[in-house]
Image (cartoon, rainbow, N blue to C red):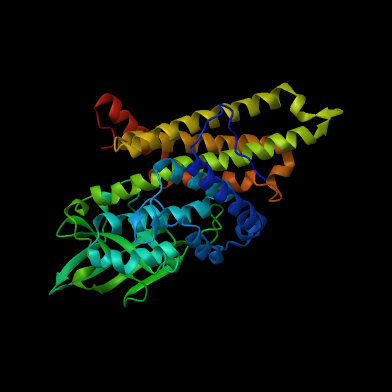
């Protein structure tokens, strides 16, 4: 059974340990055996979605509607264990929970919550989140997707790109400009004028569904809009992304732990010059760097979780954790591949798969550079983004 790296003897409470162990077992038994084939074939293991629901992992940080209402550190540990299996698995769960269920829970009407949250928690309904456009990634305010009123209805036009879960989603949380202001809408699968196109030939997140969403005069009923005042403007979608970025900060640690564990085991078994390569100074230097950076990332994520539960986590702190931990994980995957040598380019080992996946994680939900500038603005008081 995989045991996560814990060089500083970090302790969690009994509930957190139980949750982490349960998800770890699920990932080991249900994900690890087949994930290389899914990555190779470019397929998402859709059969595990109801199992995620039965385990209580979907919407697990929400209260009511069949959701588990776990604390922030438990939610982080869930993401860590899921991404240890694959970034695509964590991405699915993160999008469902933080980018779809959370905005419905936070900004939706009672009717919208009743309609969707219980079914999404069970895995009977899947969601996606449409903010990014092909020409507007780091600058979402430049979006060209629009909504106009037509009597009591709304008419939606535009396109969204790089959308996780897009073509398999039963409901899409779509952000578009209404009278010049960004608003959120729930768009159901099968609505006339709404279509999706999957992105193929990816070298990253291959075990995840990535889609383009197209809206051609899509007529939406009046009750499709997220009505809460706090959902008006970019603060609505950006608050959702903050929830997801917190999960990414933990998930990246899981990917790094998987690569470190694989490289450490291999280095003890692989012999060159009549001795295990773990005995060589340069290999030990790489392993020491990995465990040091994983430990630092753990402590950063734990403190962020504590602040989150206290309601004191600032968006720049979330950016720092996402920025640091994903960069750490990507470098760890690359070093692990080095230790594995030529074997590391084959999918018999996982470092190469994690390395490819983390290239996307490094970029999505705020690029590394954008998060760097968010931290820079927080410490200088000077905005460098525009």
Nearer to the camera, 45 or 193: 45
The residue furthest right is 274
**Rendered view: 197 above or below 251:** below
Q: Which residue is more in the foreground, 263 or 52? A: 52
**The N terminus lies in which quarter of the figure?**
top right
- Which residue ends up furthest to the front in the rendered image? 14
Q: Is residue 66 above or below residue 8?
A: below
- The residue located at (64%, 55%) in the rendering is 29
Decide if residue 32 is on the left or right side of residue 232: right
Q: Is residue 108 left or right of residue 121?
A: left
Residue 78 placement (x, y as % from top left): 49, 47
Q: How many marks?
A: 0
Q: Quadrant of residue 268?
A: top right
Front one among 281 and 369: 281
Residue 251 on image: x %, y %: 49, 44
Q: Which residue is at a point 71% across and 38% down the rendered structure image?
A: 340
Residue 263 x, y percent position in the rendering: 68, 37
Quadrant of the rendering where the C terminus is positioned: top left
Q: Is residue 61 visible?
A: yes
The residue sitting at 65% across, 29% down in the picture is 287
Q: Is residue 133 visible?
A: no
In this image, 237 relative to 365: left or right?
Answer: left
In terms of image quadrants, where is residue 266?
Answer: top right
User: Can you give x and y, in whole percent of width and height, for residue 171 in the image?
Assistant: 36, 67
């Amino acid at each position: 059974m995989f045991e996560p790296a814990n060089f500083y003897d970090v302790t969690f409470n009994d509930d957190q340990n139980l949750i982490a162990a349960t998800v770890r077992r699920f990932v080991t038994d249900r994900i690890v055996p087949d994930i290389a084939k899914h990555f190779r074939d470019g397929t998402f293991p859709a059969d595990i979605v109801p199992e995620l629901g039965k385990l209580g992992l979907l919407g697990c940080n929400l209260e009511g509607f069949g959701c588990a209402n776990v604390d922030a550190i438990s939610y982080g540990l869930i993401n860590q264990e899921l991404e240890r299996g694959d970034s695509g698995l964590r991405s699915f769960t993160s999008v469902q929970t933080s980018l779809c269920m959370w905005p419905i829970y936070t900004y939706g009407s009672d009717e919208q919550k009743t309609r969707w949250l219980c079914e999404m928690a069970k895995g009977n309904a899947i969601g996606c989140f449409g903010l990014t456009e092909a020409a507007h990634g780091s600058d979402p305010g430049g979006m060209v997707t629009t909504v106009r009123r037509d009597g009591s209805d709304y008419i939606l036009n535009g396109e969204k790109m790089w959308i996780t879960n897009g073509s398999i989603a039963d409901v899409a949380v779509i952000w578009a400009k209404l009278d010049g202001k960004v608003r959120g809408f729930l768009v159901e699968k099968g609505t006339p004028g709404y279509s999706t196109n999957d992105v193929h030939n990816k070298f990253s997140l291959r075990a995840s569904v990535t889609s383009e969403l197209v809206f051609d005069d899509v007529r939406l009923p009046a009750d499709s809009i997220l009505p809460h005042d706090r959902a008006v403007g970019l603060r609505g979608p950006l608050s959702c992304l903050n929830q997801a970025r917190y999960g990414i900060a933990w998930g990246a640690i899981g990917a790094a732990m998987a690569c470190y564990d694989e490289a450490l085991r291999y280095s003890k078994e692989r012999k060159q010059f009549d001795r295990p390569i773990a005995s060589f100074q340069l290999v030990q230097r790489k392993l020491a760097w990995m465990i040091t950076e994983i430990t630092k990332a753990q402590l950063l994520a734990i403190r962020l979780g504590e602040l989150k539960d206290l309601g004191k986590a600032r968006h720049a702190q979330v950016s720092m954790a996402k920025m640091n931990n994903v960069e750490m994980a990507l470098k760890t995957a690359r070093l692990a591949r080095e230790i594995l040598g030529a074997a590391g380019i084959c999918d018999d080992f996982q470092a190469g798969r994690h390395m490819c996946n983390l290239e996307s994680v490094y970029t999505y939900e705020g690029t590394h550079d954008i998060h760097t500038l968010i931290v820079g603005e927080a410490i200088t008081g000077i905005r460098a983004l525009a």
